[in-house]
Amino acid sequence: MLDDYAQRITHYMPFAITVIPELKNTKNLSEEQQKQREGQLILGHLQSSDYLVLLDEHGKELRSIELAEWLTTKQITARRLVFVIGGPYGFSQDVYQRANEQLSLSRLTFSHQMVRAILTEQIYRACTIIKGEPYHHE
């Protein structure tokens, strides 16, 4: 399902999913240390011109049509739009400081796999809304 939506999106815009490997040997690390290590990995994948959007429970919630409007604006203003899903303990302070914006998919908590699928489907849905295609029903 994830690959299907990712492929569909490429008909509208460049799109790629990068998965940062889970940290190993975290048993002796505090939550804060884990967030710091994950944060370093995340920041290491970014370019200085990237528009960084964190998927965070405290972020702004958008309806699908609002996401399409938001995406339209970002396609004009952002060189490269990067969405990041946080680890089990959230993001490090460095990542929060680097972020341009925070969005929330729901107040519910989902696994990383579910968030990837939901976000990818919503980006595809936004693309079809922008193009006026019949995928989304309001």
Image (cartoon, rainbow, N blue to C red):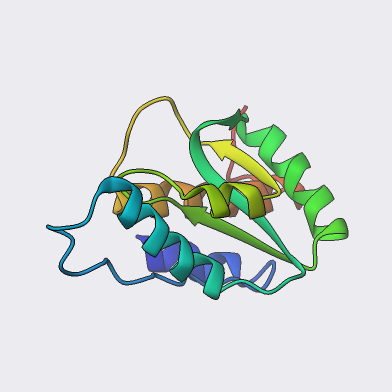
Q: Tell how many labels.
A: 0
Residue 82's spot in the image, x, y percent? 62, 61
Apparent side of residue 50 relative to residue 27 in the rendered image (left or right): right
The residue nearer to you, when weighing 17 against 44, is 44
Residue 4's spot in the image, x, y percent? 42, 66
Q: Residue furthest right?
A: 76
Q: Name the residue: 69% across, 66% down.
A: 12
The residue nearer to you, when weighing 113 against 2, is 113
Q: Quadrant of the C terminus?
A: top right
The image shows residue 104, relative to residue 20, as above or below, that is above
Q: Name the residue: 39% across, 47% down.
A: 115
Location of residue 102 (image quadrant): top right
The residue nearer to you, when weighing 73 against 96, is 96
Apparent side of residue 6 relative to residue 10 in the rendered image (left or right): left
Q: Name the residue: 31% across, 39% down.
A: 110
The image shows residue 128, relative to residue 9, as above or below, that is above
Q: Residue furthest left?
A: 27
Residue 15's spot in the image, x, y percent? 59, 71
Q: Name the residue: 34% across, 60% down.
A: 1
Apparent side of residue 41 relative to residue 76 in the rendered image (left or right): left
Residue 68's spot in the image, x, y percent? 71, 43
